[in-house]
Amino acid sequence: MPETVLAVDFGLKHVGLAVGQTVSRTATPLGAIAARDGVPDWRLLDAAIGEWRPHRLLVGLPLNMDGTVSEMAERARRFAAVLRNRHAQPVELIDERLSTREAKRLQPDGDSHSVAAALIAETWLNG
C-alpha cells in the first residue's frame, strides 16, 4: 500500500518540511517554518500536515557522531512526542547525522532546512 510521509528537520529557529512517498522512494522539500527556541508556528505546521495527510511523520534525530544523545536530540524527542499527541498518528525518529551538512552542500544559498528534511525522508524511504 503506498504511503505518504512528512519529514521534519527540527531546529531552534527553523523547522524544515519535506513530503515523500513510498512508490518512488523520493522526497520533495516543502520549505521551512519559523520556530522560536524550537517551538514552531503550530498553525503552519498543522496546516501542512492537514494538506498532505501523511500516513506517518518522521522527525530527524540529531545524534552526536559517536551515536550518543545530544541536547538537540533530546529536544527533538520531546518535539516528536508533542507531534504524536497533537496528531494521534505514528511519529518515527530518524538518525539524521550529517544531513544538515549535506543539505547545505546541496543547497548552499537556499533553504537547507527543507532539503535536510527531504534527506531525512529519503533515509527512511530507502532504509
Image: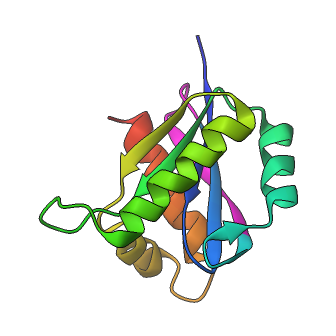
Where is residue 4? Give x, y as percent.
64, 30
The chosen color scheme is: rainbow
Which residue, as the protein is rendered here, is positioned at the far left? 66
Q: Magenta segment: does it hold 23?
A: yes
Which residue: 64% across, 75% down? 14
- Left or right for 48, reference 124: right
Where is residue 123? Give x, y as percent.
38, 45
Q: Between 16 and 37, which is closer to the camera in this rendering? A: 37
Where is residue 47? Give x, y as percent.
87, 49
Which residue: 36% across, 58% down? 96
* Looking at the image, residue 90 lies above or below residue 16: above
Q: Magenta segment: does it hold 67?
A: no
- Left or right for 122, reference 56: left
Q: Quadrant of residue 33?
A: bottom right
Q: Between 23 and 90, which is closer to the camera in this rendering? A: 90
| Image quarter (top left, top right, bottom left or bottom right) of the N terminus | top right
Residue 79 visible in the shown view: yes
Q: How many marks?
A: 0
Q: Main secondary structure of the magenta part?
A: strand
Residue 119 visible in the shown view: no
Which residue: 65% across, 27% down? 89
| Image quarter (top left, top right, bottom left or bottom right) of the C terminus | top left
Where is residue 110? Give x, y as percent.
62, 83
Which residue: 63% across, 67% down? 15
* Looking at the image, residue 26 lies above or below residue 39: above
Question: Which contiguous range is marked in magenta?
Answer: 21-32
